[in-house]
Structure formats: C-alpha cells, structure tokens
Amino acid sequence: MSDVGTERRRLTLSQDEFGVLGSLVVRRNGRSVPVTAAKHRIVLATLLLDANRSVPATDLIRRVWGETPPDRAAQTLPVYVMRLRRALGEPPLIHTTPTGYRIDLPPGALDLHRFEGAAEEGAKLAAADDLGAAARAYERALGCWHGPPLADVPSESLHETEAPGLAEQRLRVTSELVDVKLRLGRCDEVIADLRRLTAQHPLRERFWSQLMVALYRVDRQAEALDAYRQASTALARELGVDPSDSLRAVHHAILTGDPALQQPAASTWAPVSQLPAPVGNFVGRGAELTRVKGLLTGGTATVVVCGPPGVGKTALATSVGHAVRDRYPDGQLYVNLRGHSTSPPLPTSAVLARFLRAMGVRADHIPVDTDELVRGYRARLRGRRVLITLDNAASVDQVLPLLPGDPGCSVLVTSRNELRLRATTVRLDVLRGDEAWKLLARSLGSEAAVAQFDALGELARLCGYLPLALRIALGNLVGSSHVDVASYVEELRGGDRLAALAVDNDDTAAVRRAFDLSYAALTPDAARLFRLAGLLPGPDFSVFGAAALLDASEDVARGLLEDLASAHLVQRVGADRFGLHDLLHDYAADRAGAAGEDLDAARRRLFDWYLRTAVEVGDVLYPELGVSGPPRLGPDEARAWLAAERPSVLAATEHCAAHGPLPMAWRLIDAVGGYFGSHGHHVEFVHAIDAALGAARAAGDHDAETLMLVWLAAEHRNLGDPRAAQRYLRSARPSGRTAWLHAGLDGVVHLELGELAAASAVFERMMALSEEAGAGPHVRIGALAGLGAVRMMRGEPAVARALLAEGLELARAAAGVNLEAACASLLGRCHAAAGEHARGVELLRHALAAWHRTGARHARAEAMAHLAAALCLGGEHAEALRAAQRSLALVQELGGSPRIESEVHNSLGLVLRHLGEPARAVAAHLRALELATSSDFRYGVIRSHVHLVHALATDGRRAEAVRHARVAHDLATRSGFTDCASAATTALSTLTTP
C-alpha cells in the first residue's frame, strides 16, 4: 500500500496560472477564477508584479486609491485580501507579512516570470553565438504576451509606473530577437515586422536601423534609403532633431556599399514550423520518445512510427518534432496525408505545392506537373536541415515522392501499416497500465483519481489502454457534478457481450466500446449531427455547414457541436470550426449507414449550401460573372468564407466528380473560380478543375466541358503560361454564356502574346455577342475594355479613351466593380500617357479602391505600378517611389504573375531614373525584360526595351541604348505597337544624331 500511496501523491498536479502581460489571468487547479471587483484586481495585480516578495501595505493602498486614499483604507485593504484568498481557494497563496502581503507562486506560474526567464536565456545563447536557440528563446519570451500589460486593471498608478516599464522590456526583447534573426540571415522574415514596429514607434531609431539593414541585405537598397528618409522626417517633425550618429552611419554604409553590411549574407530562406501544438495531456511513451529522438538526432533519414488506430501515433510524432526542433534549424514541415480517412487522400501534387509555398516559393514558381514539383521540392531542401512529418500515410506510394533526398533532412512517418521503406520502424503499442491511469487521473483531478484508484485502473483496462478510447471515456466523465467511475465501468462492461463476438486482437474493439457509450449518451439531435458529420468530404467544417447537414438553424447546430466537443467526439480546430479524428469519422459514417437516414438528401443539403454560399460570395466579389440576387455578405465576410472553406469546397468538388451528383462538381468550380484564380493555390485548383472536367465529359455536357476548359486556360494564364492557356481555349466549343467568357479570356491572351489583330477580332466578336438576347451589360463592358486596350497599345489614345470612358460609365451603372476597376485603370494609363497626370492618378486610385473591396490583389499590384508611373511623370517622385515599392512588395508576396511583375519593375525603373539613379533603373528594366520574355508577354518585352533605351542613355551607355532602341523598333513594328515603335524611332534619331 505504501507504493500506491506514493504513486497517488506523485500524481497530484499543479495547474496554477497567472498573467499580467495583457488582461489579468487567474487560474487555479486548471480552472479560471473570476476576479470581477476592480479594486480586487488592482490588489492582485500589484501582488503578482512582485510575486514571492513582500509588498508593503502602503504600496497596495497607493495602487488602489492613489495619492489621496480614504480614511479607512488601512482597514478596508485586509477585507479585499481576505476576499481574494477566498476566491483563489486552497492551498492558500496570499500570506501576511510583517509589513504587508506576499503571493507565493510556483516556478513558471506567472507569465512575467516566464517572459523574463526566456529573455535572459535568449541573451545568454546569443552571446554564445547559439543563434538558432537564441531566436527560439526570444520567441518563447514574446509568446508570453497577449496584449498591453495590465490591460483590464483600472489603476492609474500601475499604468503610470509599472506598465511603461513592462512595455519597454517587450520592445527591448523584440529588438534583440530582430538582431539575432539578422545575424542568422533571416532578413526577409523580419521586414514586415519592422515596418509595423517603425509605424507604431517612429521615434525608436533602433527599429529604423534594423529595417534599413534588412532591406539592404535583400537587395532592396532604394527601400532602405527611403526608410532613412522616413525616419529623418519623423524625428524632425516630432522632436525637431536630426538622426543620431549611429543611424547616419548605417545610411552612409548603404550609400557607399560598405561590405560590412552584407555580413552575414542575405538569405531568402525563412524557417517554417508547421507542427501542430503538442498534446496537452501527453503521458508515458518514455522509451519510444527516447528511441525516435535518438534515431533522428543520430542521423537516421527516415523513421516510421506504426501502430493501431487510436494508439497516439500523431501525438508521439508531434511531441518528438517539438523536442528535436533545435536539430532542424531550417524548419519543420507537417502534413496529414489522410491515408486512412473516408475523405480522399491528399494528392501528392497538393502536398508538394503546400510545402513549396511554406518554404517561401512564390506561386508562379510552383509547377503543376508532379515530377517537376518533386524536383523543385528536393532542390529547395538541398543543403538544409528540415524535419518533414508525414502523418497518417497509407502506402509507400504516398511517401516516396515526399522524401527529400538530402542527408541533412529527416522524415518522420506515421502509419497504421509497416511501410516497406528504407527506414527504421518503431511500433507503438497501447499504453502501459500505469500510463493509462495517469492519463485518466490528470483530467479527473488528483482528489477524484485517488478516491477511485481501482475503478480507474479497471476503466483503463476496459478501454484497451488505447489513448483515443481513454480520451473518449474522459469525455463522458469530466464535467459531471459527481464523477462516478465505478458506475461508468459497469456500463462499459455491459458492452462486453457485444464485444465478445469481435475477432481476437481486433485493435479497434476497445475504441468502439468507448465510442458506443459516448454515442449512446448523446441526445437524439446530437447523435444525428454526429452521424451526418461522417458524410463530410473535407478536413473540417463550420457551424453553418453542420446546420446545412441538419437542415436546422446555426444556433441549434452550434449548441449540438458544443455537446459533441464536450464528449470528445469532435475537435475544435478554430473559431466556429470543428473536425473529426479519422476513426470517429469512420464510426460516424458507419452509424449513418445503419440509421436508415436519407444520406443522399443530407449530402445534397451540404453541397447545395456550399454552392449557394459560393454563388453569393461571387455575387459580392465578382458580380460581372452573373448575380443571383441581392448580396447578404460584405466583401470581408465573403473573402473570409472562401479562405476558410477552400479545402472543403475542393474536396466536395472531387467527391461529386467521382460519386455524383456530377453537375455539382463543375458548378462549384464555376462559383469559386474568380477567387482561386486571383489568390494562389493554383495546383490544388487545377487538380479540382481536372476532376470537374472529367465529370462534364462523363455527363456529355459540352457547355460544362467548355466552361472547365476556360477555367483551366485562365489558371495557366495566371501561372504565366499563355501558350498553354491558348491550347485549352482552342480545344473548347463555346456556346451561350460560355461564348463570351471564352471570348473575353481569348482576347486577353492574344493581347499578352502581342497578337493585336487577333485580339481585336475576338473583342469585336464579343461586342457582337453583347447584342444577343440574354447578354448582360458586362459582355459589352468587357468588349469595350478589350478594344480600348488594343487601341492604347496601337498608339491611338483618343479612340482608346472614348471606348474606355464608355465602358467605365456602363460598369458604374451595372455595379460591375471589377470591370469598372479595369476600365478605370486602362483609362488612367491613357490619360497619364497623354500628359494628363492628375486625371490619370485619380482614375488609377479609383481602380485601386475598387480592387481593394473585392480582394483582387494581383490587379491591385498592377494598378499600383501604373499609379507609380503616373505620379512620377507628374513630378511626384517621392510618392511615386513609395507606390512602386508597395507594388513590388505585393506582387512578390503573391507571386503567380510574371507579366504583372514585369510591369512593376518597369515602373520602378522609371521612378529610379527620374530620381537620378540610372544604373539601378537599368537593373530594374533588365529584370522586367527577363520576366516578360519568360512569360511570352510581347508588349512587356517591347516596353522594357524602350525603358532601357532611356535609362542606358541617362547612364551614359549610348551604344547599348542604341542597340535596345533598334530591337524595340523592330519588335514593335512587326507586332503593331505603334506607340512603342514611335518612341523607339524618336530615341534612335536622338541617339544617332552627332
């Protein structure tokens, strides 16, 4: 019995947590303790700030009542302390001292102590040049913050004397973290944070200095110099002083190209960590943890953790991943391959595309072909130390393309099967009896666990010592007013009569027994929702999706989901979003099949909700594609819905393409195509379009087939491959609505390829289509915009302005926000080219505002580039530089369009030339030429040559300027770009005149 007593005492856990780095946090024994009285909060906050030290009563009185306390303050204070003691419970934390009071906290219980400890650790590691560990320590320190210090503590005294010092510590640690990241070469990673910090703290020169260095090291010298100008302006305006000697020294080093600024060399790699959060109640597995960690840190390339479902493979892999992070300083990639899910497994192409995006590869640099994706993935990992965790793999075929092939990287695979790989396999079995007991005891609390020691052991045995079964059992026990483990054990034993028929060594039998009891305890409505959740094709779902399945209100669905979450039958994965473990998903689907419910009707409700909402979202963001009714959502809500439901909509598309209803597949693609076409995720979208195209062909629906071919063409055009887009368009047979969609895209592709005659013919045909019955105003607007663009490129500005002005007026009348923006942007360019800079700027800003509402970020980047050019030509050079830099930052963040990036670099070069930096202008135009050439953007190629003529001539490189002028003239003349040909002729005449 003495051993049992020792074990019981050892299982008593401290779960106290207090916080002052944000709103006041008070938790005792894992429970939140409300401290609502304002003065009680002040007393507690004051004690916490000096935790484990005596705080004089006079100090407490001053914090609570200020400098003029009431007469009875000394008598009232002990009352407040007594009430706090009562609220905080046993064992007591607040103690009386000879001079006042002291709160005693265990190590790590207060966020301020954790922050200070991690910050001190970071400083020591940085001094020892262990930079990776230092960065992680600093990040851990800053992770302790959750808002302004003492945010909801109403004490003027504390906010005047204590809060500023805490805020200053936070900024100091932030600056030290940035220093470490700069030393690691992680410059790209810190730029966005430094821009935010300099905006919030414009007088802190250290942040400006760090921003300048970071920008310089990633070859953004102009932006670095502009940062210095912004700092100088802020200091002069607010303080009437010049920058300090240290900031001026950084500025001088950038101007002179001081090699010291390039140490260490800039790196485009930003370490990424995709690991899920560690499981909170993880117990045991000491031997397995030690072995897997030892294998990975010892150089083993691939480790496979296999075992039965529900045994905790993912929890172990996640714990190992976090434990060995120091060994993989370049990052940790993670993906759930869904190998044993009723949802379709993730395609290899989608996994590789996700990984490449996570590793900083731009969308336009991510290929669609799987073999090219594998090569790009392995090349990106070459020379790096990255841990790749492949969770829930079903087969060798799923894993092989994801192996990195670099000795510095390791792969950790979890699977129910022993995969035949060149790997070390670690089999995970059920928990030992004492480990299972601990898992239960931690959740039930030490007092209840000790009182029912034997019953808990029996419960663990009946659950087969499987972690998933144990957690489900806990869902039935935790939260009850009286936890009666013995009664629950009797219920669970009752299932043995059914389980006796199970095959010996059936790993899922114990799980099913726990599931059965949890399911039986549900209300009929909650049980029905759980069953229907087994029909969901995606990785997670929202409250609204659940309401659609049920054919009930959102409030009803939310309440039922809370019941299911409390029973551990669903998991919360975000705000109003939930998911199911694979086993629970299968179990729910089995229950749904056995319940005799109309499952097809439930699926139809869900898919109809996806489609209906997607159409409503399209009405808001892309009204030109057709409006079904008055909008119920705002632009922000529409974009948020698409971002959250993207995986589910794509999964639903592929499910319908494979299992029906087939028309739903292409309708979903058509509804969300505008969003996916402008927000990346091209590989996944192309995969889904291919599935919908197969469904259209299987159904013999030629209009749907054409529609899917148009969307495939649009995606390949977005990916910078207009020739591939043209091939898809030529294979289509447009009619009806698809005729104008096809014509609009066909004309744009011809334009970008420099085929002006063909583009003009297509847009004229589109104009004819606009006269047909049923054609909406957007058809004519699109034709006018296309014809206006052709005339602009041909050097016919008056005709172009007339066409575009008509298109703009029609778009405004029709509330076609994207077409309105397109017409305004083109018209603004025409006015700017004609010397009407103010009008050009006005129109381009109007286009920017419109595209901001719809979230069309690529279009915004292009319009911003043309705005920079218009501002520059109008003499507003500083504002032009800022616009060009913002445009470049946006297009490089987004990727996906070398055509637009070419336009951006040409605008930046134009601005730099007018600012007296011709050499840097030449570099910008050469980059524009490279991008335009790679994407067959003929107009961009010619414009780049014309810009190079002026930049080279300004830089004194006359012979090179003449060569580019001749190339520009030849290309422009052959392609029909009259305005460019004229500009090249004028330049040649000037350059060759003695």
Image (spheres, grey):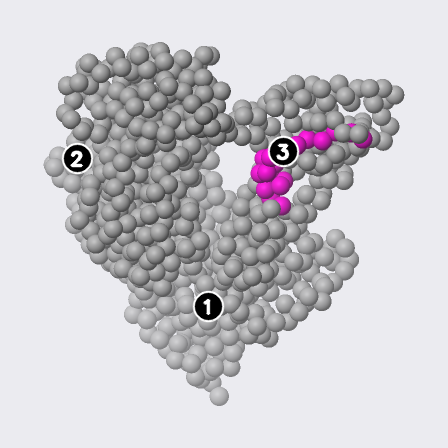
Crowd rating for badge 3 (residues with CA inside 10 Å; few <14, some 14–19, many 20+): some
- Helix, strand or loop status at disc 2: helix
N-terminal-most mark, 3 or 1 = 3
* Residue depicted at x 59% and y 70%: 254
At which x and y percent is residue 809?
Answer: 44, 42
- The span shown in magenta is 99-116
Please say whether residue 100 is one of the residues in the magenta stretch: yes
Q: Is residue 379 visible?
A: yes
Q: Looking at this view, is 760 or 399 the one in front?
A: 399
Indicate the amino acid at tag 2. Answer: Ala
At which x and y percent is residue 954?
Answer: 52, 77
Pick the quarter of the image with the N terminus: top left
* Residue depicted at x 22% and y 38%: 416
Query: Comparing marks 2 and 1, which lies closer to the viewer?
Result: 2
Which residue has dot 2 on it? 658
Determine the CA span between mark 3 and mark 1.
59 Å
Crowd rating for badge 1 (residues with CA inside 10 Å; few <14, some 14–19, many 20+): many
Please say whether residue 384 is one of the residues in the magenta stretch: no
Q: Which mark is residue 35?
A: none
Which residue has dot 1 on it? 924
Determine the CA span between mark 2 and mark 1.
48 Å
Which residue has dot 3 on it? 105
